[in-house]
Image: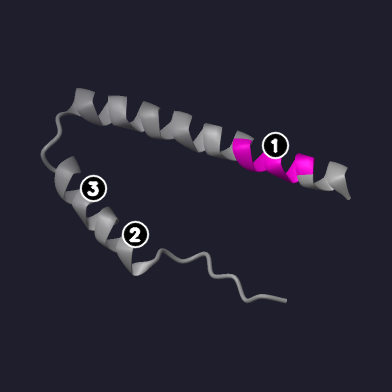
Amino acid sequence: MENISFDLTLEQQFQMKLVEQSAGNMNREQMQELLVEISRLVMLKDNIIKGLMKECTLRL
């Protein structure tokens, strides 16, 4: 079985630093808008993963 890592890649760590720097320049309203958008994207990602898993199990 393949060894799967759930840590951030080096590139993702760099992107996180950029996000942290950008967040420091945002006001409260901008932060709230960003949080809502991030939450929406995470939910969409969850739905995509669930859909793909369901599709895979139906093909077995």
Residue corresponding to mark 2: 12
Residue 31 % position (x, y)? 25, 31
* Dot 1 or dot 3, earlier in sequence: 3
Judging from the image, what secondary structure is the residue with disc 1 in? Answer: helix
Q: Is residue 32 left or right of residue 40?
A: left
Image side of residue 8 versus residue 14, left or right? right
Q: Dot 1 corresponds to which residue?
A: 51
Query: CB under 8 Å between callouts 1 and 3?
Result: no
How many circles with numbers are drawn on the protein? 3
Secondary structure predominantly adopted by residues drawn in magenta: helix
Span shown in magenta: 48-55
Q: Earlier in the sequence, mark 3 or mark 2?
A: 2
| Of the pair 26 and 51, the residue shown nearer to us | 51
Q: Residues within 10 Å of mark 1 (few under 14, many from 20)?
A: few
Residue 15 - label: none
Q: What amino acid does circle 3 point to?
A: Val
Q: CA distance from mark 1 to mark 3?
A: 29 Å
